[in-house]
């Protein structure tokens, strides 16, 4: 898979993992203290070809994602669940399989096989989340983690899960498909 967008990751090992899975331009932030030169490079990529923010599913990764999203609100967002990104107690993009990396990037709307975009998908509501057992039920967090892994959006709390579905244009039909695999 070849990406036109530039992928923004935290470190060199994350960069290596992404490049083992796809052909893309990759920029590393080297943590939260992003240097001005790096921010300028990200801005150039954002303005010219677009960027995909692909940070680790941990506290530091969420903080870096929040900062970059505030600066580049039109950036695509790629997510891994903690299970997909964990190896021997270490959590990071560098630990994910190439297949999980590709799935996360496709879910962000990158690549040829993506079904995302401005299509008129039926928006998911919190009532839908409750009906599907993704909120307000026993093992909702587990169900969200499994469905989120299939969709490539990670496993956040119910409110953030719903926001990610909306932001990424994932409609009710696609969510129901991801949940059917539960059975």
Image (cartoon, helix red, strand yellow):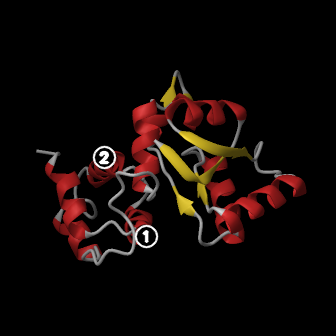
- The answer to whether any part of residue 65 appears in the image is yes
Q: Residue at x 75, y 47 (%)?
A: 29
Residue behind mark 2: 150
Task: Give the mark nearer the N terminus: 2 vs 1.
Answer: 2
- The answer to whether any part of residue 154 appears in the image is no
The location of residue 99, given as percent across then percent down, is: 40, 34
Left or right: 68 as drawn, with respect to 182? right
12 up-or-down from 80: above or below: above
Which structural element holds mark 1? helix
Q: Residue at x 43, y 35 (%)?
A: 84
14 up-or-down from 182: above or below: above
Q: Nearer the viewer, mark 2 or mark 1?
A: 2
User: How would you rate the neighbour count of disc 2 (Cα within 10 Å): few for under 14, some for 14-19, many for 20 or more?
Assistant: many
Q: Nearer the viewer, residue 51 or 59?
A: 51
Left or right: 19 as drawn, with respect to 33? left
Which structural element holds mark 2? helix
The location of residue 129, given as percent across then percent down, is: 25, 67
Task: Say which quarter of the image contains residue 149.
Answer: top left
Is the C terminus in the top left, top right, bottom left or bottom right quadrant? top left
Residue behind mark 1: 163
Q: Residue furthest right?
A: 36
The location of residue 88, given as percent across then percent down, is: 52, 21
Is the N terminus in the top left, top right, bottom left or bottom right quadrant? top left
Q: Residue furthest top?
A: 88
Q: Of the numbered discs in the image, which one, if any, rests on residue 56? A: none
Q: Nearer the viewer, residue 89 or 94?
A: 94
Q: Residue at x 72, y 69 (%)?
A: 71
Q: Residue furthest left?
A: 183
């Amino acid at each position: 898979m070849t990406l036109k967008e530039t992928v923004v990751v935290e470190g060199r090992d994350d960069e290596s993992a992404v490049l083992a899975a796809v052909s893309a331009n990759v920029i590393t932030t080297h943590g939260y203290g992003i240097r001005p030169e790096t921010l300028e490079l990200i801005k150039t990529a954002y303005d010219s070809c677009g960027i995909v923010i692909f940070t680790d599913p941990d506290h530091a990764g969420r903080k870096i994602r929040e900062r970059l999203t505030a600066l580049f609100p039109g950036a695509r967002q790629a997510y891994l669940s903690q299970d997909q990104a964990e190896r021997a107690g270490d959590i990071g993009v560098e630990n994910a399989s190439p297949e999980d990396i590709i799935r996360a990037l496709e879910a962000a709307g990158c690549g040829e096989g993506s079904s995302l975009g401005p299509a008129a998908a039926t928006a998911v509501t919190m009532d839908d989340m409750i009906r599907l057992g993704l909120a307000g039920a026993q093992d909702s967090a587990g169900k969200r983690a499994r469905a989120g892994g299939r969709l490539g959006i990670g496993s956040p709390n119910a409110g953030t899960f719903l926001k990610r579905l909306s932001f990424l244009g994932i409609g009710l039909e696609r969510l129901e498909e991801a949940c059917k695999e539960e059975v």
